[in-house]
Amino acid sequence: MVQQAVLETGSEAAPARPRVGFLGVGWIGRHRMQAILGTGAVDVAAIADPSPAMAAEAGKSAPGAQQVATLDEILDLGVDGVVIATPSAMHAEQSIRALERGVAVFCQKPLGRTAAEVQAVVDAARRSDRLLGVDLSYRFTEGMRRIREVIGTGELGPIYAVDLVFHNAYGPDKPWFYDPVLSGGGCVMDLGVHLVDLALWTLNSPGVAGVTGKLFAGGAPLQDPASQVEDYAVATVTLETGAVVQLACSWRLQAGCDAMISATFYGTQGGLSLRNVNGSFYDFTAERYRGTSRETLAVPPDEWGGRAAADWASRLAAGERFDPAAEHLVGVARVLDSIYGR
């Protein structure tokens, strides 16, 4: 009868928007919620956080959402997707539990503490045929988008060197970041994951031939990775193309500014670089180099912080299922494992 009525009137009811739950709504979780709400593509069905104050604050943006206590309670509501912003040790297990219930996942980085954990999540997404996204947000800056586009044209010739830097003058404010069991590692896991992702994503996921790394804690070589996490790291990644990627990252470096962030790609016919402006965590310029001259590709302002989450929500609403590109996440995790000597 309903189908017949639709045919007679020539109109169709708008498809229902996906219902999404949010697990963890601290600062990052709330920011991602705002970005997802801004798409208008999904509805917030549920919010869960150990802090009633945090949950209540998030609820102001989604007054129709149910306040629940656990991931299982979110899943029991029959949601279509879940956004996970919890401590790193929980990411893989929570993502797998959601995917096995047929629920799409958008997870804060890192997706797992090891390549084995990340592979298990990707495998779960493939089996359930559900969309999997990770908040690797720097690839969504306008500057990195332009850089990847130019490299993709081949205009720079073969890319043979990549230099990556992420120094944070501060450090995480939550104790679990400094527990290797809970975090999986220090500044490499927190910041280096972005650098490795940018290099491999920009170069279209090339094979990795070798990795070496050196970790420091408190200004000395890291002695006991079972009880300490690194606060400074350098690494060299050799790609199967012959290109070499060098990266450095740190917490609490005496660098004279809040942050030093850059990703520079050198080819035989020119170079490209993304750099933060005046120590900012948010403002970036992108430039193209030709010999001693330079051309500006992107400048602030650029509201990029929530684009990864918004992209996932829009793709979920469009009905997208498992994306084989998620296997890239495993490649990134394997590089991190190698830096840690795992």
Image (tube, rainbow, N blue to C red):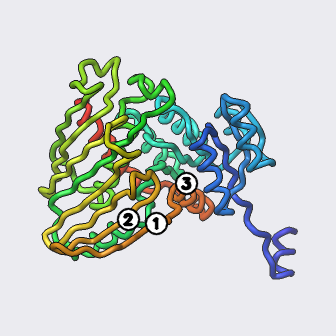
Q: In this image, 131 relative to 119: left or right?
A: right
Q: Quadrant of the N terminus?
A: bottom right
Q: Quadrant of residue 202?
A: bottom left
- The residue sitting at 27% across, 61% down in the picture is 203
Q: CA distance from mark 2 to mark 3?
A: 22 Å
Q: Quadrant of the C terminus?
A: top left
The image shows residue 223 at horizontal and vertical percentages of 24, 19
Q: Quickly name the residue at label 1.
A: 300
Q: Nearer the viewer, mark 3 or mark 1?
A: 1
Q: Dot 1 surroundings within 10 Å: few (below 14), some, or many (20 or more)? A: some
Q: Quickly name the residue at label 3.
A: 309
Asked if residue 257 is positioned above or below residue 178 in the image, the reply reads: below
Q: Amino acid at mark 3?
A: Ala
Q: Earlier in the sequence, mark 2 or mark 1?
A: 2
The image shows residue 333 at horizontal and vertical percentages of 33, 41
Q: Amino acid at mark 1?
A: Pro
Q: In the structure shown, which secondary structural element does the residue marked by tag 2 occupy?
A: strand
Q: CA distance from mark 3 to mark 1?
A: 20 Å
Asked whether disc 2 touches disc 3, contact meaning CB atoms under 8 Å apart, the reply is no
Q: Earlier in the sequence, mark 3 or mark 1?
A: 1
The numbered disc on residue 238 is none
Q: Which is more toward the observer, 259 or 200?
A: 259
Q: Which is more toward the observer, 251 or 209?
A: 251
